[in-house]
Image: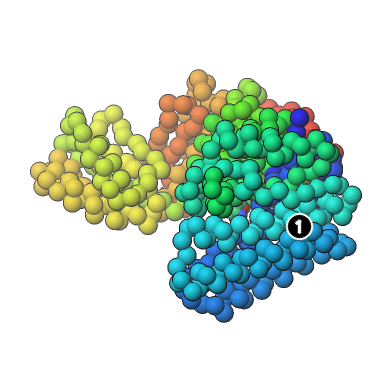
Amino acid sequence: MTTILKFGGTSVATADVIERVCRIVRGTPHPVVVVSATAGTTNALIGAARAAAGGDVVAVETIMARLTASHDDLLRRAAGKDDGEATRALEDLAQRTKALLRSVAILRECSARSQDAIVSYGELASSEIVAAALRSRGIAAQAVPATRIVVTDDAFGGAAPAFEETYARARTELSPIVGRGQVPVVTGFIGATREGVTTTLGRGASDYTAAILAAGLGADECLIYTDVSGVMSADPRMVEGARPIPRLSYAEAAELSYFGAKVLHPRAVLPAIEAGIPVRILNTFAADDPGTTITARAEADGSIVKATTSLGGLGLLTVQGSGMSGIPGFAAKVFDTTAAEGISVLMISQASSETSICLVVPADTAERLKAALERMLAKELAHHDVERVLVERPIAVVAAVGEGMRGTPGVAARVFGALGRGGVNVIAIAQGSSERNISFCVSEADQAKAVRAIHAEFGSSRPVPSAPPPASASSVR
Ligand code: ASP
Ligand code: MG
């Protein structure tokens, strides 16, 4: 049995934090480590690829000189004494990446395929550094490029893994290493086609790699180490009493991320969840904190609203008019227009009177959508079936999320009662039939006030949840 330990970019960025990583690895039985590129590296490499495509050789050299120097320096600081294996690997990687960038500069174009090869430098380098750091502390460790494990299609920049093949390879590549008592340090984010061409799984996809390996190896747990102590009950910049949520169901995590909670992209951890493997969000910088455990289903813990999340920078479009009522296909027209403009809708609300349809879209697309809708509805507007298309912005969507809301009467009353007492004017309301989420729009000026009002209403009244069992690594400081 194994435990997946995934460390994000900030968790591998300095020698001090790599020291923490090593202690966590040491405290975990049979770990398989997955790493991201050091913070900022992927962006820098994309910058280098763009500069190369534009023929700006000087910029490419500057970026690469800075990146390679910082990686060499990090290796020296994190691994202490000279690690020949990692030093040579970093040198080869730097040479190869510079050669790739030179070809891009000659061709003056950077395909997604070339870019994937270039950005793979980030994870390949950090896996070498972390493996060397572990070895320097007497922990047998080996960098393993995921190009040997994660088999993907050739959709460069966002390749889709072939799960069964990948799972089989995870077992044949990694189990023997773990069996020998060694720690594999696998690159997140990257994979390869069946022909062996390097691909990437999309930005931020190291979590995905971790979840895929967890599923393939049938791991006990998938621990995602980041720089915050889990998913918070509200944005701590808005709410002083915000705290990490001990347990979330997958569905709750998905609802939360949709409206702005940024800790992880839940879809990325789905392979682990589907395999029944709990995913825990933990803090490398505070490894004793219990973090957030995400499982397929949540146990009832007496809470009603677990988290309040919000997203600003939005616009509300209202199509208004009494002639719309009872006309089949009217909503379809509105949404077809929105789709044709390539605008994604964050929230929809229509009252049963059918005299208005509200949709929430990114604020900077609202005027364009209004114009498109006015063109599409020109006839209805001329006949006064549609009175007008209104735009309000900037607005925010606030969502109260929790499995405990389901089937609990009076939740909406408490939500809106709290808002009323807080003096927050609600512009539109939506509740999905999942009943895990009540969402509403307020003017952006009221966003923080609304989040605070709901958090206070449910946060203070709910029983203090008992702490989950400590992570296998939580005894490590
Ligand atoms: N290094 C990659 C990125 O920045 C993957 C990751 O960090 O998860 O997108
Ligand atoms: Mg990252």
Pinpoint residue 434: horizontal percent, then vertical percent. 46, 26
Looking at this view, is 5 or 56 the one in front? 56
Image quadrant where residue 208 sits: top right
Quick check: 225 left or right of 45?
Answer: right
Name the outermost residue toward the front: 195
Q: Identify the element where label 1 is drawn.
A: helix
Q: Is the residue 273 above or below the residue 110 in the image?
A: above
Name the outermost residue toward the bottom: 58
Q: Residue at x 45, y 68 (%)?
A: 109
Q: Is the residue 78 above or below the residue 185 in the image?
A: below
Q: Residue at x 73, y 61 (%)?
A: 89
Looking at this view, is 264 or 354 the one in front? 264
Q: Is the residue 187 above or below the residue 52 in the image?
A: above
Looking at this view, is 276 or 121 the one in front? 121
Image quadrant occupied by the N terminus? top right
Pinpoint residue 127: horizontal percent, then vertical percent. 72, 53
Whether residue 333 is visible here, answered yes or no, is yes
Q: Residue at x 30, y 45 (%)?
A: 339
For disc 1, the marked residue is: 129
Name the outermost residue toward the left: 383
Pinpoint residue 232: horizontal percent, then vertical percent. 63, 42
Amino acid carrying label 1: it is Ile
Whether residue 261 is visible here, answered yes or no, is no
